């Protein structure tokens, strides 16, 4: 359509850094990347415009009756103006209101979806972005079992299994040794010093504690030497990793997907109202998307909710460009 010399009504809402709206002298003025780009188009095509903000503060979400909310709905809905053309009715003249769109166009960028494309026409693609989960900065949580972190659970399990096996083996070897000692010496029982394996040796070897009295048997010395070597290696690795963890605490991000967000259960989440993601989750009838929609809340946009993200420790599903703007 010819735009030269026309005055258009343009729907717009705040999406920093693309569009930021300010009230000046009773009318809206826009700034931002998309607003500057639109001003260049208006100057080249010689048209003026008035900005109109949607009352529901939505971008456009399809309803069951086929209508849309937000700026998409403003482009879809037709209203009748108070002025129009004259027609003859009997012997009198009257003004016939002419129907037209609530707004002539809307200032995005908009997410292009099949549902929206059935009621509006989109311009050429200006920017392509993805969506993600904008999380509050993770905090270091108290961990009563933190002393086990230097070694993996597989190492602890193997160490416990070997320790139990050693105790059982020690009982068997001590029993065999006592039997042989009785047959050789004919005594009622061997002295305590004649035990081949003592559990206390294993504990002291792992804790790097001094052993006051060394065993006399060759088999016992080999057994003790093996545990002393294993204790030296394990204790050195344990102390080194524990020192590094205490010096530079490692903070892990507990959520890396929508499944993690739902299963973690400690971070509330919100969706941007009237966006394509809101439409996607709202249309779901079962599964993960329905859970995201039913158990989450709504915010106008992530930029305006940036203080809530910090104070309430809340996650917001939004585009990556907005995340970088909030962080900046």
Image (tube, rainbow, N blue to C red):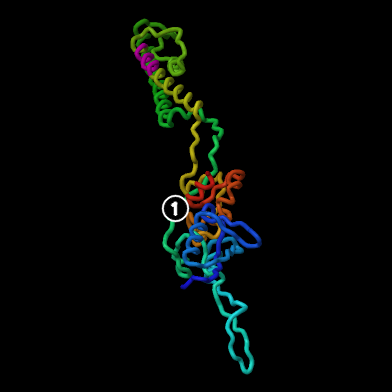
Can residue 280 be seen at all in this image of the molecule? no
Could one spot residue 165 in this view of the protein? Answer: yes
Q: Is residue 46 left or right of residue 55?
A: left
Q: Residue at x 58, y 47 (%)?
A: 306
Residue 256, percent from left and from top: 46, 45
Q: Is residue 96 left or right of residue 117?
A: right
Residue in the image at 58% along x and 88% along y: 87
Q: Nearer the viewer, residue 241 or 85?
A: 85
Whether 91 is drawn above or below 81: the answer is below
Q: Which residue is mark 1?
A: 130
x, y percent for residue 287: 48, 56
What segment carries the magenta color?
A: 221-229
Q: Say which residue appears at 63% left-offset and 62% top-offset.
A: 27
In the image, residue 146 sits, relative to residue 318, either above or below, namely above
Q: Quadrant of residue 185?
A: top left
Q: Nearer the viewer, residue 92 or 127?
A: 92
């Amino acid at each position: 359509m010819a735009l030269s010399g026309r005055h258009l009504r343009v729907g717009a809402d705040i999406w920093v850094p693309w569009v930021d709206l300010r009230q000046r002298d009773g009318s809206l003025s826009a700034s931002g990347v998309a607003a500057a780009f639109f001003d260049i188009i208006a100057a080249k095509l010689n048209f003026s415009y008035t900005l109109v903000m949607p009352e529901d503060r939505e971008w456009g979400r399809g309803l069951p009756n086929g209508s849309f909310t937000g700026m998409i709905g403003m482009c879809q809905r037709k209203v009748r103006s108070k002025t129009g053309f004259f027609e003859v009715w009997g012997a009198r003249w009257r003004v016939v209101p002419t129907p037209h769109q609530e707004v002539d166009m809307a200032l995005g960028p908009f997410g292009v979806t099949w549902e929206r494309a059935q009621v509006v026409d989109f311009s050429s693609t200006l920017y392509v972005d993805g969506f993600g989960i904008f999380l509050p900065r993770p905090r270091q949580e108290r961990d009563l079992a933190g002393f086990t972190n230097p070694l993996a659970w597989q190492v602890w399990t193997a160490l416990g299994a070997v320790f139990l096996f050693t105790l059982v083996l020690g009982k068997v070897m001590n029993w065999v040794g006592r039997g042989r000692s009785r047959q050789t010496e004919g005594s009622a029982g061997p002295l305590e010093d004649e035990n081949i394996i003592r559990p206390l040796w294993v504990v002291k070897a792992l804790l790097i504690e001094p052993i006051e009295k060394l065993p006399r048997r060759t088999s016992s010395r080999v057994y003790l030497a093996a545990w002393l070597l294993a204790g030296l290696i394990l204790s050195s690795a344990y102390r080194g990793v524990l020192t590094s963890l205490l010096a530079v605490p490692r903070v892990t991000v507990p959520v890396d997907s929508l499944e993690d967000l739902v299963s973690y259960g400690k971070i509330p989440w919100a969706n941007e109202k009237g966006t394509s993601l809101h439409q996607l989750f709202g249309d779901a009838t079962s599964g993960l998307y329905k859970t995201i929609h039913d158990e989450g809340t709504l915010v106008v946009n992530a930029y305006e909710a940036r203080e809530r993200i910090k104070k309430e420790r809340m996650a917001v599903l939004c585009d990556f460009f907005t995340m970088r703007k909030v962080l900046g």
